[in-house]
Amino acid sequence: MLENAEKPTYVRFLVSNAAAGSVIGKGGSTITEFQSKSGARIQLSRNHEFFPGTSDRIIMVSGAIDDILKAVELILAKLLDELNIKDNDDVEPRTKVRLIVSNSSCGSIIGKGGATIKSFIEGSQAGIKISPQDNNFYGLNDRLVTVTGTLDEQLRAIDLILSKLCEDSYYSQAMHAPFSYAGIFFSGFHGIPYAYMLPSVATATYNSMSYAPNGAGVKFPNHKEDHSNSITIGVSDEHIGLVLGRGGRNIMEISQVSGARIKISDRGDFMSGTNDRKVTIMGSQRAIHQAESMILQKVANVSERVMD
């Protein structure tokens, strides 16, 4: 446990636009003060960069666990202060804070048969609820963990949750992932994904995609991270439903497990000279490789059945 105390980690949670303003303070004065008091780094998503499906901005606090908890306490205390609850001074107000935790890390918080989350609830006296997977968004790999309680209860719960997440090496690696949810697809009409656009950030990225003549090269010119790789594979029109799954379930699962973003061409938009739909997979080499093999597996399963 001790070796995790110093390792840099992070926590992300949602704040309303108004709350974000009070955390930043006049000319950034509050956020600067909180950073120097706590020793943690505090970052906020831009004005219109909301968590998909909400109108809340994302705040990320990073550093050593103790510094993070100090910063979170300063932030939540400030927000409580803004609420200015004067109903009953003897009773400490119970509020909600919504943490963002990736799907792959939720399992460790839940524990076998829910044992871990139960122990966290008992240990902190806070209410802890993990939202179900939001199936409206293609490629959304995060869920919300709602922590309800007094400030002390919330901080105890966040301490327990964060200490657990620290043990997961994937969690800490994701610290440098970009904030924006620009690549999330809102599953709109007829289950064909259209880009869930965040004004300002996303448009630049999407409009400047350049397609190589063979339809293989999708480049994101202004992202330095290794998210710029992409491959396009063909999947026959009759099998594309297997890749998508009911309501897009399979493609979302593949995207979540692999960490890749997957785009399927519209009906009638085929790889040249074939009846194969274009499936473009974007992400790190490892993510692409994993997503590709999962897609091919789905298609292979049915081909074998036809052969039998």
Image (spheres, rainbow, N blue to C red):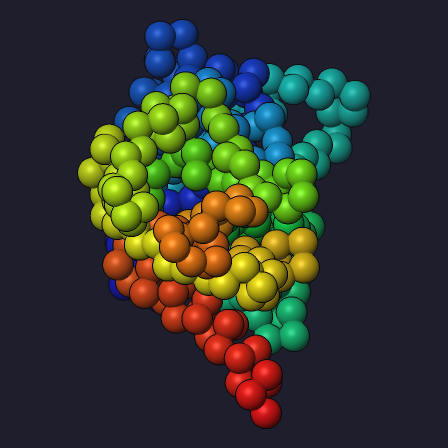
Task: Give the percent coordinates (x, y) of residue 39.
Answer: 28, 35
Residue drawn at (48%, 78%) of the image? 300
For residue 177, above or below residue 47: below
Looking at this view, is 100 or 276 the one in front?
276
Instruction: Specify the farthest residue to the right.
Output: 87
Instruction: Tell me which residue sits at (31%, 46%) in the image.
Output: 215
Indicate the position of residue 166 as horizontal and vertical percent values.
38, 59
Placement of 204 over or under 109, stated as above or below: above
Residue 84's place in the image compared with 150, above or below, is above
Nearer the observer, 204 or 90: 204
Q: Quick one: quadrant of the C terminus?
A: bottom right
The residue lying furthest to the front in this view is 273
Residue drawn where x is 34% and y is 29% of the image: 205
Side (left or right) of 57 relative to 230? right
Q: The N terminus lies in which quarter of the figure? A: bottom left
Q: Is residue 148 visible?
A: no
Tell me how many marks there are: 0
Q: Is residue 276 visible?
A: yes
Residues 278 and 134: in front is 278
Q: Position of residue 126 (x, y in %)?
A: 66, 50
Quarter holding residue 238 = bottom right
Estimate the x, y position of residue 21 in percent, counting from the top left: 49, 15
Residue closest to the far left: 224
Please tell me in which quadrant of the rendered image residue 187 appears: top right
Please name the residue shown 60% across and 26% down the image.
Answer: 55
Residue sticking out furthest to the bottom: 308
User: Which is nearer the eye, 227 or 48?
Assistant: 227
